[in-house]
Image (tube, helix red, strand yellow):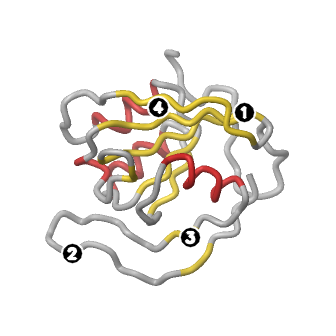
Amino acid sequence: MKEVGTGVLHYQNNIPEMTKKRIAIPMAGNVLSEHFGHCQAFAYVDVENNAITKVSMMDPPEHQPGTFPKWVASNGATDVIAGGMGPMAVNLFNEAGVNVFVGAQVDTAENLVKQFLAGKLTLNANYCDHDGEHGHGHGHDHGHKH
């Protein structure tokens, strides 16, 4: 895929649901990595008509600022569920047309996607500023309908 997001408009409200999604999740072992840039692998969860059809694990390239968002988008991700993520990564995903859900709790990729699809994924603000301050917790539930 050379051009990610071309022809696909991403709106959060008043748009018919997409029937296919590819949700990327940064992993540490078998669970969500709390720090996006420090993950060991990415789980790619393919969803069709709100059902998980496939879960694949892929090793990312060597981490340099900005490489992970470009690599994740180039692998066809429509959405990313993450724990902590810096603002540069969020901006790069937004530019690529990839929806970002930050502040997810540590769990398996399959459980996170099931919660996401059911509109029950709990997100806390958790942007990493890389100055030693992580998480500006104000817990709330985002009732995403996907």
Q: Are marks 3 and 4 in contact (CB under 8 Å)?
A: no
The three-letter code of the residue at mark 3 reads Thr
Query: Which one is nearer the viewer's eye here, 69 or 36?
Result: 36
Element carrying mark 1? strand
Contact? badges 2 and 4 (CB < 8 Å): no
Q: Earlier in the sequence, mark 2 or mark 4?
A: 4
Q: Is residue 44 left or right of residue 60?
A: right
Label 4: how many Cα within 10 Å (few below 14, some 14–19, many 20+): many
Residue shown at 44%/66% (left/top)? Answer: 105
> Quick one: label 2, few (<14), some, or many (20+) residues within 10 Å?
few
Label 3 element class:
strand
Amino acid type shown at disc 1: Lys
* Residue hosting label 1: 20
Please report whichever mark, 1 or 4, sits nearer to the chain's N-terminal start.
Answer: 1
Residues at discs 1 and 2 in contact (Cβ within 8 Å): no
Nearest to the observer: residue 55 or residue 25: 55
Pointer 4: what residue? Answer: 73
Q: How much space separates mark 1 and mark 2, taking CA atoms?
A: 36 Å
SS of the residue under disc 4: helix
Marks 3/4: CA distance? 23 Å
Q: Amino acid at mark 4?
A: Ala
- Residue 133, numbered circle: 2
Residue 128: quarter of image: bottom left
